[in-house]
Amino acid sequence: MANWEAFRVSDVVKKISDEEFVLPVIQRRMVWNEEKMELLFDTLLKGNSFGGIICIEEEKGSEPLFAFRPFSKDGQPLDSVQRELLNKGHMLVIDGQQRLQTFYIGLLGSYEGRQMYFDLFSDFANLEYSFKFENDESKLPKYDREKAGIKEHMWYSAKDLFKRLKETQDEDQVADEIIRLKNIVDETEKNHVFRNVRVFYKNIFSATNIGVSKITVNKSLNLNENRQRVVELFRRLNDGGTKLSSYDLVASILKGFDWKMERFLDGILKENDDIGLTQDTLINLLFVLRDTPMKQMTEISIEDAEFATKHFSRIQQTIKLLKNFLKAAGLYNYYLKEKNRSFIPLYFIAYNIFYRTPLEQPLDEKMFDTFDTNNGDFKKMREWLYKSLLNGVFSRGCGWIPYKTGVRKISNVVREHKLKDFPADELFKIYRDHPLRFYEIHTAHLNEFDKEIVFHMIYDELPNIRENDIDHIHPVNILKSYGYDEYEINRVGNYQLLDNVTNRFVKSGKPLIQWIKNDVSDKDAYLRRHLIPADETLWEASNYRDFLKAREELIVSKIKERLSL
């Protein structure tokens, strides 16, 4: 059963402060940015509708449906708590978190250290109300060239304005105080202050403009069934507004089964966002570890949540060891989060680590400490990962759908190798049998490989490259003048990485031999870094084909050296 009640913004903010409005564990974290929050306050002062709030009403002394957390005053995530019985009644906000959180932050708190300011010279006649978040009032813009009428801004802390209006309940008194404080003498400017303070007071302290629907739940029913009904309601309500992603919904379902899933997701993500581990990839990893990599949303069960919370520490340790593996393999920087690499192959290395010992036994924290000499399993993992990356096995257009066919076929193999060495040979056989476009490391195939991972292996660590940093060693125009075609010119063997300034303004289109002899200060270091053949006759464009052959052999040798082949 549901019933609607109208509240003032000031009432709602007080109820949030008193923890009468709280957030159930199934709610995601705050996703609105400052711009959306500023626009909500503009909408509020214009008197426009911004949707209703849906809550589950729970009575004092009852068993709560979910663990819950208070709203955050500074936008930072707070942990949910589980209570056996409620010591006071409250409302679980199912829909409207972002809007309520915005009002709470804007009027009582801050966002990432910045509080909200209201421009008291806003153009009330045209219903244009300006709000800005800032940590220092002096950083706020002083003038607006596009603004009609008064072009100057007069920023005032929304938090201070709210506090003073709450104390006095007199908008004219507060406007007078601000005018005296700011030494405003111009009558037009005074009028703006009065009008804007009044509209702020009206829409926050007088108007009942927040509609709250209170839903009651029949708690005589099975608790888990009730929780999943609410999760389904949560999903349907969030089809509007800022939509839930499919993984947001999966996370909500899992947290609905077991509130400790919030700790699982938040704890692991906080420690491992350096390698691009996200909520989505962590949930996928959980399903891979459960041997259900293709699980559908409708198939998620309480056993999934129980597995995650039961093995929380082991999964944490697995990801720590996975990062140790990436560092030992020279791929940690390649997987840094801002580079947005496919996480799919890492699921299966993590799987092998997780099941390296029986689940009742601890993992070996030094698993990859002897990778250079004694750990043959490390070498298998490294070779499989590098060859997979070189061949783009987990990229689009590789010959299968990586997140469907690829995940399913690889999962079938690794599942048979629990407590065993990493099955690199069996996985390579999958590639060949599918068949994928998969090549062994040879100069004939070098131009078929993924360019970024080749650069990574040439330079040991991949710098932050842009297209402008990829330089033709032998310049294009010179090679064309010798009659070489596009296929011969645009090959990995003729690419090097140079910073943009050196590429465009120092080297530019100079012949290679001229560039090396006249502009390279440390010739030996340059040749080593870029794997340039030392034979000076190959620096002549007329000998380009011999140069290309020699350099491709150097690159392939470097790749094989990295893989100990």
Image: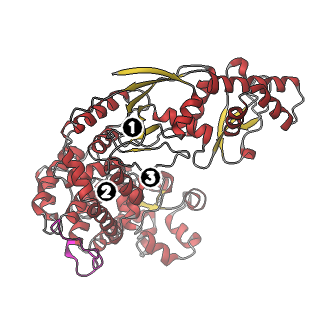
Q: Where in the figure is residue 494, as x and y percent of width and height?
A: 41, 60
- Of all residues shown, which one is farthest toward the bottom? 373
**Residue 263 in sight from this viewpoint:** yes
Q: Main secondary structure of the magenta part?
A: loop
Q: What residue is rendered at 12% in x and 61% in y?
A: 426
Q: 238 or 291: which is nearer to us?
A: 238
Q: Where in the figure is residue 349, as x and y percent of width and height?
A: 24, 62
Label 3 environment density (alpha carbons within 10 Å; few <14, some 14–19, many ≥20): some
Label 2 environment density (alpha carbons within 10 Å; few <14, some 14–19, many ≥20): some
Q: Which residues are magenta?
A: 358-377
* Disc number for residue 447: 2
**Image height check: is 49 above or below 267?**
above
> Which kind of residue does numbered mark 3 sit on?
Lys
Q: What residue is rendered at 28% in x and 54% in y?
A: 448
| Mark 2 vs 3, N-terminal side | 2
* Disc number for residue 480: 3
Of tags 2 and 3, the one toward the viewer is 2
**Residue 406 in sight from this viewpoint:** no
**Image height check: is 245 above or below 423?**
above
In space, the residues marked 2 and 3 are separated at their CA atoms by 20 Å
User: Mark 1 and mark 3 in contact (Cβ < 8 Å)?
Assistant: no
User: Mark 1 and mark 2 in contact (Cβ < 8 Å)?
Assistant: no
| Mark 3 vs 1, N-terminal side | 1
Of tags 2 and 1, the one toward the viewer is 1
Q: Where in the figure is residue 456, as x and y percent of width and height?
A: 39, 63
Quadrant containing the C terminus is: bottom left
Image label count: 3
In space, the residues marked 2 and 1 are separated at their CA atoms by 69 Å
Of tags 3 and 1, the one toward the viewer is 1
Q: Is residue 296 magenta?
A: no
